Amino acid sequence: MARQAYPGVADPVAEFEKLRPLVAELRRMQRRCAPFGRDYHAIAVALEGLETAAFHFTRQPRFFGDGGSHC
């Protein structure tokens, strides 16, 4: 697959690497929620959004890893 260039994003992998602390904090928050409750799922939406965006730009599936999340 040819590498896609995105204006303003010279190194998408490096840019998404900067978001790892945010992903880790969201996962910590999610672990404090009732499993599969409303709050748990609200955080899952954010995590999946970040994962989807990272895949779009990097083409690396599960860029942030599973992290034990069930989203």
Image: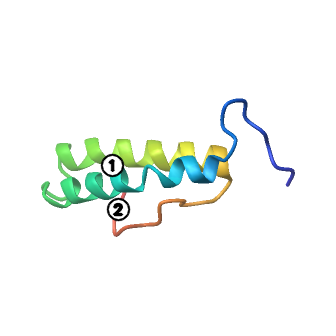
In percent of width and height, residue 34 lies at 12, 56
* Quadrant of image for the N terminus: bottom right
Q: Left or right of 66: which side holds 31?
A: left
Q: Nearer the viewer, residue 66 or 24?
A: 24
Give above or below for 49 relative to 8: below
Q: Residue at x 41, y 56 (%)?
A: 20
In percent of width and height, residue 26 lies at 28, 51
Q: Which amino acid is tagged 2?
A: His
Give above or below for 9 relative to 69: above
Give the image quarter of residue 6: top right
The residue most toward the right is 2
**Label 1 SS:** helix
Q: Which amino acid is tagged 1?
A: Ala
- Which residue is denoted by mark 1 in the rendering? 44
Q: Residues within 10 Å of mark 2 (few under 14, many from 20)?
A: few
- Which residue is denoted by mark 2 in the rendering? 70
In percent of width and height, residue 24 lies at 32, 58
